[in-house]
Amino acid sequence: MRDATKDTALPGAPPPFPEGGRLADNILLFARALRRAGVRVGPSRSIAALEAVAATGLRRRADVHAALAATLVSRPEDLPLFDRLFALFWRDPQFLEKMMALLLPSVKGGAGNGAPKPAERRAAEALMGAAPPPATAGEGPGEEMTFDATLTFSPTERLRHQDFEQMTAEEAREAARLVATLALPVRPIRSRRSIPASRGRTPDWRRTMQGALRRGGEIERLARRARRTRWPDLVALCDISGSMIAYARMVLHFLHACAHAEGGGWGRVHAFTFGTRLTNITRPLMQRDADAALAAIGATASDWEGGTRIGPAIARFNRDWSRRVLARGAVVLLVTDGLDRAEDESLGREMERLHLSARKLIWLNPLLRWDGFSPEARGVRAILPHVDSVRSCHNVASLAALAEALTRPEDGGEHQRLMAALDRREGTR
């Protein structure tokens, strides 16, 4: 363990740790790392962790592990991440160097003992942000260095506007981290159900009469009700054919962030992939760790980088899943380039049915990155009349701009321009 000797006394309790070390400070740093990694750890849990570790007597490592897990982890899906953080934080004093090896394997000249497990990279990023840099013995205050940033460009800003298909593997990993931090200001919607409210507009006659019966029939005040609000559901249909593979992976990272957003956001998030067949990936998407979720999705969907049969896939969704996931008025994201290879003419009919079932249907098409894009393909012409908004999804900035279509009902993106081009094309025939 790292400097496992000191503690600060808790209020009203004797000092539980020996004096002269930094164990209590390290436990708080460990709790901070868990919080950065996405585990729900508050001040009360950190205090409980200090008390639990003190109660173990610091005799066995397994007892400390069990005490921290019992006090800092409240969800089963967070246990793998906790185990990784515990092993990395408490085993080796030189953990920062190992974290740099995990995050930047190219610096070490290879991948080491193999690719890191899904939770390791997330644990490494959390520890790099939570722990202070190690101090060298005898090191004093360093010399202040200044840099001239005139006429320089931010790498992050450049990455936000770079096409997903043109990124290197390292740039794609950094873009995935940026996508995971996107916050969409989703507006809550008013439900048909009502709840008791002191300032509600609707009288609650039942509660009013119940209160009057307890007072001998005298009505002291008029009880009221108000319509409750709830977060809307999100349903995504993502094309994973060969032409969409680079964009589909980033959209799946985006959906994972939506599904695990803290402090409000979407109600229920359902996701489906389609190439030659429709696959429900909602369950693997619910895994807390993004790398593990994407690996599980890759194992579940067997038609990656294949052909595209949009019409049959939408038809199966309408038949098997529409009533289950769209009953509460969900927002639907259709992620495809519209290049349909199906020979039937059912796409327009199925898109019309999907549009009538959705609260709002938003089409994300990476081909909109080209200024001269026009509805020439048969699939594009069949989809376009039955969507509310058309937007691109070719870079991080385009996914961040999706908030406009979600928070402004009148925002249609490129829909009006493309419909005008479609009308001109049909008129010249």
Image (cartoon, helix red, strand yellow):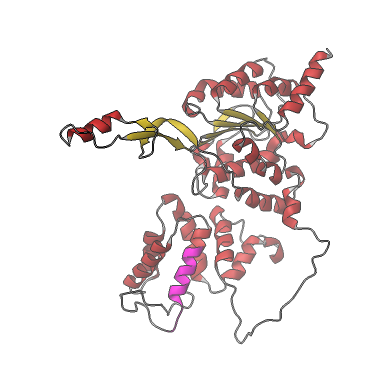
Where is residue 404 shown, x and y percent of the image?
65, 39
As rendered, which of 26 and 267 lies closer to the eye? 267
Q: Position of residue 64 (x, y in %)?
A: 38, 68
- The answer to whether 72 is drawn above or below residue 401 in the figure is below
Q: What's the residue at 60%, 38% (across, down)? A: 407
Left or right: 259 in relation to 390 = left
Residue lying farthest to the left in this orientation: 216
- Frontmost residue, 223 versus 33: 223
Q: Residue at x 46, y 37 (%)?
A: 230
Which residue is drawn at the image coordinates 54% and 59% (left, top)? 123
Residue 196's image quarter? Answer: top left
In which quadrant of the rendered view does residue 358 lie? top right
Q: Is residue 216 magenta?
A: no
* Range covered by the magenta-colored residues: 20-32
Total number of numbered labels?
A: 0
Q: Quadrant of residue 142?
A: bottom right
Q: Is residue 109 visible to the viewer in this orientation of the structure?
A: no
Which one is nearer the viewer's eye here, 366 or 210? 210
Q: Main secondary structure of the magenta part?
A: helix
Where residue 330 sits: x, y (%)?
A: 53, 31
Task: Check the image and name the residue furthest to the bottom.
Answer: 138
Q: Nearer the viewer, residue 271 or 414?
A: 414
**Magenta residue check for 29:** yes
Q: Tell me if residue 256 comes above or below residue 125 in the rendering.
A: above
Residue shown at 68% from the left, 21% from the top:
385
The answer to whether residue 266 of the structure is visible from this angle is yes
Figure quadrant of the C terminus = top right
